[in-house]
């Protein structure tokens, strides 16, 4: 949409003309000029807002139609690896659910139950990643993969170290709840939020104290539930990664973390811009840059499922299932790389590598 609509341009001219006329006819103080401007803005904004609302239905309908068309073409390009990832998801879901119904079978019940909670979380995150990819948001998908990787590392760490770590991990929620309640009450009035009452806060504090008595110490940091393994406080996530042998994923984890925070990044460094012919600002979906999010998600989901299925004494069936999902994960990486290579020439030839950009660039739509 242009920076200034005709109505806005008219209001600009009217405002300036009225202020210029008034100041020529009268000698206004600075406060009176500010009051006049405020009055003009108050009168003009209602008219402008009504104009925006009147045009909105047609604009939104066109946007939705455009988005549906994009999603269809995006899926057509990445159909094969996307379908393979959904196949992996279905396989992991079915065998994970069956394994959960079998129960601990001689393994520690608390550890098993914790893994049975973490596996569905990994499936949910994978579904979110697929939703972002199907919508054309490779960088958003990469950001959600960060959470998937954390879930995998947590599961592998608990499976490796057993009951005490599983107990502390599950108890950590009461310490986090208490910290959240303290933070909320500190800013509730400014944030226009309802603070916890004295009775509610006392209940939260009592649960925190009960958890502290149960595990024998107070957890302070996000990863302190793992501190019994390291015999020290102030544990970091990288400590868990190293312990389970996944610290070689650290560069990718840091890469994915760039999208979580507001650090400066050049527009061309986004995955959605990897096929752009010139620098521009991406503000919407793109069908570029899907290889890494697809492959990394597939690997992490297979790691999570393997950690769950192989905890304890694995049988032949579960070993076969793990081999299947590992093969699917590898196939997804190969498929994504091939699809990008084969489709890029075709898309460029047809001038339909799509990216929604700000007006500083030229949208290739």
Image (cartoon, helix red, strand yellow):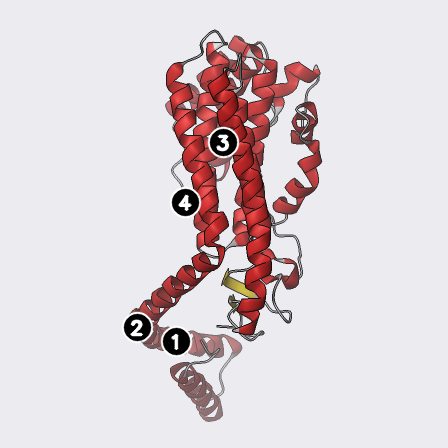
Q: Position of residue 25 (x, y in %)?
A: 45, 93
Camera-side mark, 4 or 2? 2
Above or below for 59 versus 297: below
Circle 2 sits on which residue? 58
Q: Secondary structure at mark 3?
A: helix
Circle 4 Cα neighbour tier, 10 Å, few/some/many (<14 / 14–19 / ≥20): few
**Residue 83, placed above or below residue 248:** below
Q: CA distance from mark 2 to mark 1?
A: 31 Å
Q: Quadrant of residue 303?
A: top right
Q: Secondary structure at mark 2?
A: helix
Residue position for label 1 = 39
Location of the N terminus (image quadrant): bottom left
In the rendered structure, which disc, 2 or 1, sits on the residue that comes first in sequence? 1
Q: Residues within 10 Å of mark 3 (few under 14, many from 20)?
A: few
Disc 2 to disc 3, C-alpha distance: 43 Å
Residue marked by disc 3: 180
Report if residue 147 is visible in the image: no
């Amino acid at each position: 949409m242009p920076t200034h609509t005709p109505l806005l341009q008219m209001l600009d001219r009217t405002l300036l003309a009225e202020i210029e006329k008034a100041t020529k006819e009268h000698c206004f103080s600075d406060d009176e000029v500010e009051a006049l401007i405020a009055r003009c803005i108050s009168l003009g904004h209602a008219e402008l807002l009504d104009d925006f609302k009147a045009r909105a239905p047609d604009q939104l309908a066109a946007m939705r139609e455009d988005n549906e068309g994009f999603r269809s073409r995006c899926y057509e390009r990445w159909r094969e690896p996307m379908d393979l990832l959904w196949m992996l998801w279905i396989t992991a879901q079915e065998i994970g659910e069956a394994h959960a119904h079998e129960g601990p079978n001689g393994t520690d019940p608390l550890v098993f139950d914790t893994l049975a909670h973490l596996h569905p979380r990994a499936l949910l995150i994978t579904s979110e990643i697929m939703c972002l990819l199907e919508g054309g948001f490779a960088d958003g998908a990469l950001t959600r993969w960060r959470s998937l990787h954390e879930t995998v590392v947590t599961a592998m760490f608990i499976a490796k170290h057993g009951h005490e770590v599983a107990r502390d991990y599950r108890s950590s929620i009461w310490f986090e709840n208490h910290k959240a309640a303290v933070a909320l009450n500190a800013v509730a009035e400014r944030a226009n939020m309802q603070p916890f009452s004295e009775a509610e806060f006392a209940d939260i504090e009592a649960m925190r104290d009960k958890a502290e008595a149960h595990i024998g110490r107070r957890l302070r940091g996000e990863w302190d539930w793992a501190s019994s393994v390291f015999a020290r406080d102030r544990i970091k996530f990288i400590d868990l990664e190293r312990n389970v042998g996944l610290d070689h994923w650290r560069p990718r984890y840091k890469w994915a973390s760039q999208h979580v925070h507001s650090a400066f990044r050049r527009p061309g460094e986004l995955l959605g811009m990897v096929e752009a012919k010139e620098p521009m600002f991406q503000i919407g979906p793109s069908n570029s840059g899907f290889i890494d999010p697809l492959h990394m998600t597939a690997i992490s989901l297979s790691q999570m499922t393997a950690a769950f299925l192989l905890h304890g004494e694995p049988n032949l069936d579960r070993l076969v299932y793990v081999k299947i999902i590992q093969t699917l994960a590898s196939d997804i990486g190969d498929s994504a790389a091939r699809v990008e290579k084969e489709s890029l020439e075709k898309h460029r030839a047809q001038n339909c590598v799509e990216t929604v950009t700000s007006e500083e660039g030229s949208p290739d739509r």
